Image (spheres, helix red, strand yellow):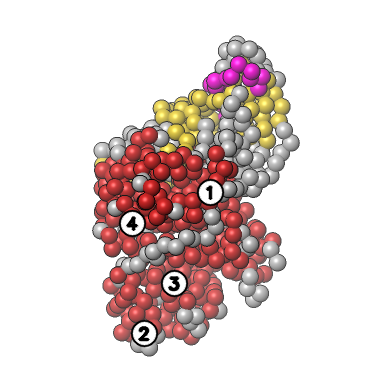
Amino acid sequence: MASSLFVGLHDPHSYAKPEEARVTHLDLNLRLDFEKKVIQGRATLLFETSSRADYLTLDTRQLFIHSVRSGDDALPLPFSLSSPDDVLGQALQIRLRPGIQKVVIEYETAPDAPALQWLSAEQTAGGREPFLYTQSQAILCRSWIPLQDSPGIRFTYTARVATKPGHLALMSAQNPQKLKSDGVYEFRMDHPVPAYLMALASGRLDFGVLDHNVGVYAEPEILPRALKDFEDTPRMLRAAEKLYGPYPWGRYDILVMPPSFPFGGMENPCLTFATPTILTGDKSLTSLVAHELAHSWSGNLATNATWNDFWLNEGFTVYLERRIMEELYGSSYRDMLEVLGYEDLIQTIEALKEEGREEDTRLRLHLDNRDPDEGMNDIAYEKGYLFLRSVERLIGTQAMDKMLQEWFRRHAFKSVTTASWMEFLKEQLSLEQWVAVQPDKWILEPFLPLHAAPQSRAFQEVEEAVFQCLNDIDKFRPVWEKWNSHQRQHFLRKLSEQKPTPKDLAALDASLELNESTNSEELFIWFMMALKAGYMDILPRLDAFLSSVGRRKFVLPLVRQLACMPALRDWARKRFLERWKLRYHYVTASSCESAFSKD
Ligand SMILES: [Zn+2]
């Protein structure tokens, strides 16, 4: 099993052949057409070739290629597209002439390009202007730019984007802060980045300052709230730099996305895309910002070479996120996050076991011939975290901080593999420590090795309350009100395990107004518990939630739950097709479709 770690760096999710010709710089010229929902593009690619390179091979998906020319003499170059694959798209093979190191591709995206979401004005907070955003991870960048879409291939880029006048355009690069009347913006990213970090957004956006190099972009209606909830971001940045070395990307800004954004956040360099579902007014869900910020080191700086090594991006980032939160708010805060994450992990392992996917509970994945999305679950995040945490327990927190700082220093702007991490760890640990940690078990074997389950003192009183709350709900209400959001989430999960009746939940709802909660995490657990208990008074609120929020973490489990309830399945399918789906990004919509297609 160990030997499979050391095979060459073939990326099973890209057609690119970087050993023949490897892209080093991209220049983009894009015109956004909101009427037709397409981007007209010109991509100029600079690349290095080996002596035997006859072709430059790129990834594309649903792109219309108008022409390919040599960048030197502007003469046409012969090209061909392979037949389309549902997951990988099409290979674009460009026949090279000797000496060519630059090609110019004129192309257009498809109106249903999976990476692009074109929102109508009504689907935004302000309701006045349409909005466009991209989501390139894992392998969707190829549906808006023809390039080598593999996390192991990095390039610098420049771009010129023409959008609607009145819009601000933003990319994963140095960004404008002021509106330009002609709607034409220029960008540059001087550090080499992989394709999945290519990002673009355009809409009616304002900018607000948090610190000299930290700020927030959002629709004007949202910006004041966002600035308040994100006000600790500069402190997070300073804590991260203290732990893991200088922040290498210049500015760190956050763009608050429309509610349809499929993820919690996306770590686009210089500009995190963040879901508005973390805006609560009390900063209780901002560990997500620490997470996306942490990706500036784990992921964006030292990048998983292929999606089989995804845990190197996410497990490390969850670890960094919790260390940052610990620096800001103390160890009890970290303990709470840890327990909540651990509960998610146990659930994910159970679910994968039920689906007969034990193999996918290993940290190092085998996603060949599958959509890499299938590996994007809590195994990478939380099992990865738990493994690093077990190393920390053994060597001490400070030694761990130092070790990770060294890891990032050595692998800055490079790809990393599970094998390279294993080698590094072996070098850093004594033989005794290595044996005690059992890295092979964690990384290569399914399920969890023996480990210390996380504990939180702040959760102890919560667990006691679970058994008493229903006896005297009026007495419980003030207890609930003084709890923080993590305690509330833990309470709702633990209560759910006790299988409350619809009558219990009606009483709880009447007292705590759970159905009216504006905290998305609490609301989600409440909905799941109510559906499982058959407490149907939630349906109008649930319908409204699923009609506006497109974050897959919430939508998919709710839709799956509805799809397996005979009394609600038909209603849910109808609402999904007629309404909910219209607001979702491709990745959320396609995940939900599979829930309804199962019997
Ligand atoms: Zn992440």
Look at mark 1 in the image and give the residue it sits on: 364
Mark 3 neighbour density, 10 Å: few (under 14) some (14–19) many (20 or more):
many
Q: Which mark sits nearer the N-terminus, 3 or 4?
A: 4
Residue 468, label in figure:
2
Mark 2–mark 4 Cα distance, whole angstroms, equals 35 Å
What's the residue at 33%, 43% (across, down)?
403
Look at mark 3 in the image and give the residue it sits on: 493
What's the residue at 69%, 44% (across, down)?
86
Foreground: 421 or 507? 421
Tell us which disc is closer to us: 1 or 3.
Answer: 1
Tell us which disc is closer to us: 2 or 4.
Answer: 4
Tell us which disc is closer to us: 3 or 4.
Answer: 4
Q: Which quadrant holds the C terminus?
A: bottom right
Mark 2 belongs to which amino acid? Gln
Q: Is residue 85 left or right of residue 361?
A: right
Mark 1 belongs to which amino acid? Arg
Mark 2 neighbour density, 10 Å: few (under 14) some (14–19) many (20 or more):
few
